[in-house]
Image (cartoon, helix red, strand yellow):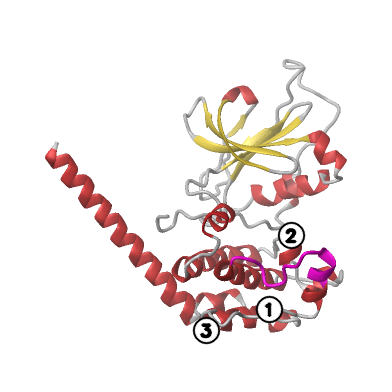
Amino acid sequence: MSTGTSRIITRSMAARNAQPKEETKKEPKEEPKKEKVVVDQQKEEETNQQKKITWTLDDFEIGKPLGRGKFGSVYLARERKSAYLIALKILFKKELTKHNVVNQMKREIEIQYHLRHPNILRLYGYFYDDERVYMVLELAQMGSVYSLLKKTHKIACPLAAHLILQLSDALIYCHERRTTMCGTLDYLSPEMILNKEHDHNVDNWSVGVLLYEFIIGKPPFEHQTHAETLECIRNLKYQFPSTFPAGAKDIVSKLLLLKPTARMQMPVLKKHPWIVENSAIFVKEQEEKEKTEKKEKTEKTEKN
């Protein structure tokens, strides 16, 4: 995993004007069977001038599956015109409606569409037909953190620190825009579970859960039943194994606090000695690895 290439999708609330079209009614006269929507092809620096295009499924060559979820699948795909590789997320409207998550899906599109940060996967655009919704996403060449955790069970401290550093950068960006990310039960803060008013500090809690999971291989509050998990979150019941690194323990302890405003903030986390030192180790290891690979490639070329 090269420096700067590990990307994390941070789900957060953004501007409202990217709301997808309602799944209804009017279809373009020229193509009655396929409905198109306009998407923005913006450069990284957002300008006032936007080049607009339309996409349909015919504009893509579909490759191997990258992942499968409850509502659909993600495929490697190539845009025919530009030959650009992307990840195409295909969601089934029937499943979205069945599980009552249509509005959630719209919100996630609206959220990700406006985010511009090197550690947040881009949503280039979206379109839909009668049965499916298609999301055109930036391709994470090195895969997902979830896949890495499944493969290795745990993450070494240098990489864990580097990923948390990247995540904290992304969250600072989102928090500056008064945005928050959502999560599954294991990552939810006590105030969200209790349906209390909450702010960006729910994300700080989630970062603590994630760092713990990186090092141990499972979330701190994970139990066999939802009820047990909820009980542990509400009462802050979790334990550190004796092998847990002291620096990481200090961070997690300062993030997993019942009082939201008492939790460590992301700018402070970025400067924590354990994060700084271990992230630097990871970066140095990657630089050495790249130098070695480059040298071996050069030697192989010279021999040929």
Direction left: furthest residue: 303
Is label 2 in a helix, a strand or a loop? loop
Mark 1 residue crowding within 10 angstroms, few (<14) / some (14–19) / many (20+): many
Q: Is residue 222 above or below residue 51?
A: below
Residue 246 is situated, as x and y percent measured from the top left of the image, at 52, 84
Give amino acid for label 2. Thr
Give the label, 2 or 3, closer to the camera: 3
Residue under circle 3? Answer: 246
**Residue 241 shows up from this direction:** yes
Mark 3 residue crowding within 10 angstroms, few (<14) / some (14–19) / many (20+): few
Give the label, 3 or 1, closer to the camera: 3
Q: Nearer the viewer, residue 289 or 238?
A: 238
Give amino acid for label 3. Ala
Q: Earlier in the sequence, mark 2 or mark 1?
A: 2
Q: Is residue 224 magenta?
A: yes
Q: Whole-Å distance between the Cαs marked 2 and 3? A: 27 Å
Q: Whole-Å distance between the Cαs marked 3 and 1? A: 15 Å
Q: Is residue 214 magenta?
A: no
Main SS, magenta residues: loop
Q: Nearer the viewer, residue 261 or 100?
A: 100
Residue under circle 2? Answer: 184
Residue under circle 1? Answer: 256
Residues shaded magenta: 217-230
Is label 3 in a helix, a strand or a loop? helix
Q: Quadrant of residue 77?
A: top right
Q: Nearer the viewer, residue 189 or 300?
A: 300
Q: Is residue 116 above or below residue 262?
A: above
Report if the CB atoms under discs 3 and 1 are less than 8 Å apart.
Answer: no
Is label 1 in a helix, a strand or a loop? loop
Q: Is residue 167 left or right of residue 184?
A: left
What quarter of the picture does the N terminus occupy? bottom left
